Image: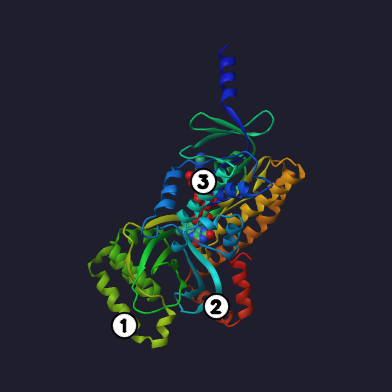
Amino acid sequence: MFRAIRHLSTVSAMRLADVVIIGGGPAGLTLASALKASRSTSQLKVELIEGGKLLEGLREFGNSPPEDITNRVVSLTPATVNYLEKIGVWDFIRYERIEEYDNILAYDGVTNSRIEFEHVGIATMCENLNLQSALLAKIEDLGESGCPLDIHDSTKVVGIDSAGNGWPVVELDNGERIQTRLLVGADGFNSPVRKFAGIESRGWSYNRWGIVATLNFKVDSFRQITGWQRFLPSGPIALLPLPNDMASLVWSTTPELANVLLKLSEEKFAAMINAAMKLDPEEMKYLYKLAEEDDNSLVDSISWRLSLFNNKLQPEQHELYPLEIESLVPGSRAKFPLKMSHADTYVGPRIALVGDAAHTTHPLAGQGLNMGQADVQSLVNCIETATERGLDIGSTLALEPYFSERWPINNAMLGVVDKLHKLFSTDFTPVVMARSFGLDVLNTVPFVKDFLVDRMSSK
Ligand SMILES: Cc1cc2nc3c(=O)[nH]c(=O)nc-3n(C[C@H](O)[C@H](O)[C@H](O)COP(=O)(O)OP(=O)(O)OC[C@H]3O[C@@H](n4cnc5c(N)ncnc54)[C@H](O)[C@@H]3O)c2cc1C
């Protein structure tokens, strides 16, 4: 008797969906938005489940964003922006908070060899919140035009099981259960969907933290809007342009140095950024020691060293370095562990993985989120094709082309980024000389640079 009642109550709490997306990060929201924007798939019953508190914050950002740029900012490739335009999301972006730029200048912290990439609109800096808020606004707009989508935030997936018919059943922490034709894991690095599907993910930790912050430039003269990246032996430091003379910092460094840097006051941290963009790695070693042991004289020591450095520059050489940082947006520092991982496959019976659930990469090339956007585009194409041909959207036949298209491209990108990280994380003289020679030569061969820009822009 007890069993029968339990069974009945379970059945009554179960609902059906065509697609359940776990994760309301950039990948999950883009997938939801693209499915609802497509004529072929707009009538599918789609539900999105997000464990964090998402909707209120994104709506608030959309209605009255904070004055300062927030600290999670990504560099979007032209391919990503084109896709967001195509599915109608870009119309909802707050343009006054993005920065498109045409120049990237990368230089070796040991030898100062450099390479410059120039291309109109090479990348667009955009806050994660701006992107996610635009995605939500588009989804809500589509909902008002008759293509509704259920988003449940503050709702965690606590279990995934298989029903008798082989369809995945997602169990939520509020006791609800959803049986779905296709379950998509857009649920980040620790992906519960990937674990449920028994898909292996291989990779390693870089033993590096990525410190992010929002910065204010000291503006004393006009500079071209440029993305700067300096490769130090402990990891690259990048200053990427934001509107209103601000910049986004991504400083990849060892856990030990990250601890030292994050204990500094914001004023001293800003001084260390200026030092790291110009001074010799040996001087940096001395400054890290000073920062750790007696940071009272740190700012003066950096000012003195930088004035010596700047005085030695010819007037035209000042353009070879970024403007100095004046201050940090208060409280904008944060750190993230950096790792490389790649799932063995992105699909299984009634399962697909997109974004960080499928792969994670070092941020030095700004590709992680962009790869996830390209995954979504490819998966949506497959679901559209299956729907148009009357195929089961959860079948391997429908999903396999997504895996075949995206896995090799992502694998190549992960490999290139991993090798770049390794190549630049050493001060072993022969390697340093070889890489500097390579950079100098590459910098003089326009067609090779154009090829690299095309690859990095995901063209
Ligand atoms: C320092 C740094 C700088 C970066 N810079 C760039 C850049 O310039 N360009 C670029 O392209 N990429 C960049 N990246 C990478 C980019 O941030 C990520 O690739 C991207 O945010 C991943 O998005 P996602 O939607 O796949 O995953 P996530 O953003 O991780 O979203 C996953 C979501 O799933 C939810 N979730 C997980 N488990 C559950 C559960 N059980 N139940 C319900 N919900 C769940 C989580 O709450 C989360 O919201 C950077 C990364 C770092 C660390």
Q: How far across and how far down the image is residue 118, in percent?
A: 54, 76
Under circle 2, the secondary element is helix
Residue 284 at least partly seen: no
Query: Callout 2: few (<14), some (14-19), or many (20+) C-alpha neighbours within 10 Å?
Result: some
- Kindly give the residue lying farthest to the front in the view shown: 145
* Ligand 1 within 8 angstroms of badge 3 C-beta: yes
Label 3, on which residue? 24
Q: Amino acid at mark 3?
A: Gly
Q: How far across and how far down the image is residue 234, in percent?
A: 43, 66
Q: Is residue 145 left or right of residue 298?
A: right
Q: Amino acid at mark 2?
A: Leu
Label 2, on which residue? 439
Query: Callout 1: few (<14), some (14-19), or many (20+) C-alpha neighbours within 10 Å?
Result: few
Label 1, on which residue? 308
Q: CA distance from mark 1 to mark 2?
A: 27 Å
Q: How far across and how far down the image is residue 233, in percent?
A: 45, 69
Q: Is residue 353 left or right of residue 242?
A: right
Relative vertical location of residue 379 with respect to residue 227 in this rendering, above or below: above
Residue 213 at least partly seen: yes
Q: CA distance from mark 3 to mark 2?
A: 40 Å
User: Counting residues from the N terminus, which is met first, the one under dot 1 or under dot 2?
Assistant: 1
Tell me which residue sits at (50%, 55%) in the image: 131
